[in-house]
Image: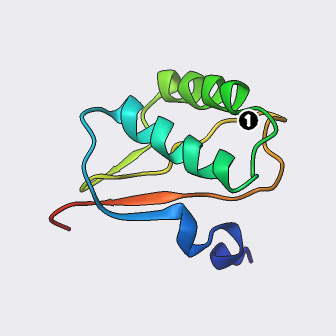
């Protein structure tokens, strides 16, 4: 069983956030991952995530989503998250 707490840390979580678009939210998360040294190539990572989003949205509802893609641009498997304002 995967331990989800090993995939993120508090610096990759943004609480009470607002974004104008899905793309803005994805870019903000990619910036956080890049700032934490989790990515080899942020642009390549974003390309993979947006390609995956074109196959079908990764939104779970209530402002939550799990954007992801397959690429070797990731240094360490990890994830970031945002919690929308009002949740």
Q: Is residue 61 above or below residue 54?
A: below
* Residue occupying the point 81% across, 55% down: 76
Question: Going 39% across and 41% down the picture, which residue do you hit?
Answer: 25
Q: Secondary structure at mark 1?
A: loop
Which quadrant of the view contains residue 79? Answer: bottom right
Residue 71 in the image, given as x and y percentages of width and height:
78, 33
Q: Position of residue 23 (x, y in %)?
A: 40, 30
Judge left or right: residue 54 versus residue 9.
left
Q: Toward which corner of the image does residue 21 lie, by quadrant?
A: top left
Query: Which residue corresponds to the image point at 46% horizontal and 29% vertical from the top-left?
Result: 56
* Above or below: residue 20 compared with residue 55: below
Q: How many marks?
A: 1
Q: Dot 1 corresponds to which residue?
A: 70
Which residue lies most toward the front here? 35
Q: Give residue 82's position: percent from left, percent from top.
A: 40, 58
Residue density around tag 1, few if under 14, some if 14–19, many if 20 or more, within 10 Å: few
Quadrant holding the N terminus: bottom right
Q: Position of residue 67 (x, y in %)?
A: 52, 43
The figure's colour scheme reads: rainbow
Give the side of residue 9 with respect to residue 53, left or right. Answer: right
**Residue at position x 61%, y 29% in the image:** 46
Most foreground residue, 2 or 73: 73
Q: Is residue 77 left or right of residue 55?
A: right
Residue 65 vs residue 83, the one in the foreground = 83
Query: Which quadrant, please, contains the C terminus?
Result: bottom left
Q: Residue furthest left?
A: 86
């Amino acid at each position: 069983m995967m331990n989800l707490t090993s995939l993120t840390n508090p610096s990759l979580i943004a609480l009470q956030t607002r974004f104008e678009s899905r793309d803005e939210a994805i870019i903000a998360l990619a910036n956080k991952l890049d700032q934490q040294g989790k990515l080899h190539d942020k642009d390549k990572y974003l390309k993979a995530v947006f390609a995956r989003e074109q196959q079908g949205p990764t939104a779970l509802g209530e402002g939550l989503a799990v954007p992801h893609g397959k690429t070797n641009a990731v240094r360490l498997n990890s994830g970031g998250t945002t919690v929308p304002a009002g949740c």
